[in-house]
Image (tube, grey):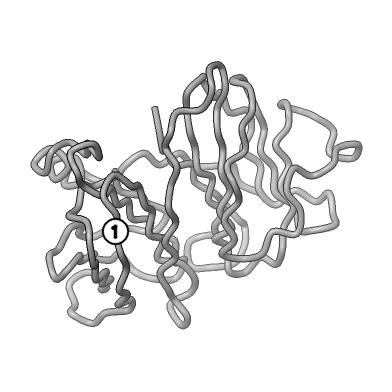
Amino acid sequence: MRHFQRITGIALLAVLLALALGCGDSSKGTAELRVVHASPDAPNVDVYLNNNKILTDVPYETASAYLPETPGSANVQVDPTGTTTAVINSNETLVASQYYTAFAIGPVSSISLLVTQDDNTPPPSGQVEVRIVHGSPSAGPVDVYVTAPGADLATTTPTLTNVPFEAVSAYLTVPAGSYEIRVTPTGTKTVAIDSGAVALAAGQIRTVVALDAPGGGTPLTAIILDDLN
């Protein structure tokens, strides 16, 4: 069992790129694209959008910042760093003023691109929003518990149940405060991932991604992405 790792960006490159392209303001007519390396046995990767390299040498369990991109057709290509051999080549459509996250997900033998449309509309006053992505290819369906820290799972009903690999939950809206997020194999109370106590401030939006250990398999882990605030 491992605690969550909090990933907020990847390298100075992403920050400089975001600044150079307008600081990610979707109100100016751009689409916002974030990339997550979620393939446990893949090496570091380079990411191309419409043949332009937008990220380089990205390691596993790492997320970029939201990068402003031109709306329209978007060819996303992922290559092992230092090669020109695409392990992912996917055509997507980006819409102005929308936010997206592209996950390179699954083992290399079946790696694919999972693209989510992210709702970064601020939550209601005093609330936070949390979304769960099941990105662990070695885990079967899971139950997810979002509770007060230390709550007894034996007497707790799962917040989400029977969540399959590559599933993306709806946003859960809860009051700001401290929470513990635990993941168990469906139908059991055996904790595979435990966030520990996580403090969430009003107005924040977070995406929690369950992942394999580096190289694949257990111990399972997770990252928490800062969507807003």
Quadrant in which the C terminus is drawn: top left
Measuring 61% from the left and 66% from the top, which residue is drawn there?
A: 165
Q: Which residue lies furthest to the left in this view?
A: 20
Q: What residue type is labelled 1?
A: Leu
Number of numbered discs overlaid on the protein picture? 1
Few, some or many C-alpha atoms within 10 Å of disc 1 (few <14, some 14-19, many ≥20)?
A: some
Q: Is residue 170 left or right of residue 160?
A: left
Seen from the viewer's position, the closer of residues 190 and 144 is 144
Q: Dot 1 lies on which element?
A: strand
Taking 144 as reference, is 214 above or below it? below
- Residue 170 rendering spot, x and y as whole percentages: 60, 47
Taking 89 as reference, is 149 above or below it? above
Seen from the viewer's position, the closer of residues 85 and 118 is 118
- Residue 56 rendering spot, x and y as whole percentages: 20, 59
- Residue 55 rendering spot, x and y as whole percentages: 20, 57
Q: Residue furthest top?
A: 126
- Residue 221 rendering spot, x and y as whole percentages: 57, 51
Q: In this view, does 174 lie to the left or right of 119?
A: right
Residue at the disc numbered 1: 94
Measuring 80% from the left and 29% from the top, which residue is drawn there?
A: 151
Q: In which quarter of the image is residue 171?
A: top right
Measuring 51% from the left and 20% from the top, which residue is drawn there?
A: 201
Q: In this view, does 212 lie to the left or right of 17?
A: right
Measuring 47% from the left and 66% from the top, which residue is drawn there?
A: 40
Q: In this view, does 192 lie to the left or right of 13?
A: right
Taking 176 as reference, is 61 above or below it? below
